[in-house]
Amino acid sequence: MDKLYLYEEIMLLALRDNEGTIASGTMYTFAISGAIIAELLLSQRIAVEDNRRRKLVDVIDSTPYGDPLIDECLLKMRSAKRRAALATWVSRFSNMRNLKHRVAGQLCKRGILRADEDQILLIFTRKIYPELNPEPEREIKERLQQAIFTEKQDVDPRTVVLISLAANTNLLKTNFDKKELKSRKVRIKAITDGEATGKAAAEAIQAMQAAIMAATIVPAIAATTVSS
């Protein structure tokens, strides 16, 4: 089987294996979009201006990546009338139409998930994606466990990005024991602060964190304004 893209790994962490539905309390769409950004940064398709506070994105290589979803996002960046910040692109990509179903559909083609339907209150029908082949997700969790629950120093950049994305969107809490994660809080922070990775991965992590902050603060401000 070909290597999974980061956003496919995020989807496997977000889905409940047997039910085929998204685990509650996660901000998985931001994790998926952050993973797409990370692929573009790590492959040096895009770069970030260091001397600008807003971290504006430049497309430096428009060569297709080879994946329909990632290439669509790269084209959106290249075709934009004006540059935008990394966090802005993370937010935009998280709102792409049918994002969940597109990613899950790719995993179905790989034979990892299967597409199915169930009913809610015997009235509404929804698409679900139960796990068909548990091995890829098992390998992902083993990588995360080794990085988080040991003192391993040479954590590869893709795993570092994955940990940061999962930590900032509550996906770690749905896949590992919360008490055990709490005991490794310092270790997780060291990883997500970029101490174990390179510049490109660190930029992807920063964009993700900024996007999550915007996603949680803006609705809270709006709710306060309405209530007052």
Image (cartoon, helix red, strand yellow):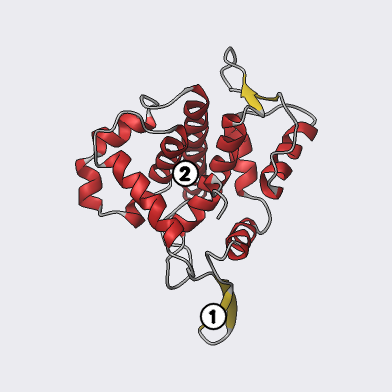
Q: Residue at x 46, y 23 (%)?
A: 198
Residue on which the image places disc 1: 118
**Which structural element holds mark 2?**
helix
**Which structural element holds mark 1?**
strand
Q: Nearer the viewer, residue 225 or 151?
A: 151
Residue on which the image places disc 2: 216
Q: Is residue 71 left or right of residue 188?
A: right
**Which is more N-terminal, label 2 or label 1?**
1
Inspect the image, locate mark 1, and give the three-letter code of the amino acid beneath it: Asp
Q: Is residue 137 left or right of residue 37?
A: left
Q: Residues within 10 Å of mark 1 (few under 14, many from 20)?
A: some
Alpha carbon distance from label 1 to label 2 = 31 Å
Q: Residue at x 63, y 23 (%)?
A: 47
Q: Nearer the viewer, residue 34 or 63?
A: 63
Task: Determine whether 200 is above or below 128 in the image.
Answer: above
Q: Quadrant of the N terminus?
A: bottom right
**Which of the 4 image quarters holds residue 23?**
bottom left
Q: Nearer the viewer, residue 92 or 31?
A: 31
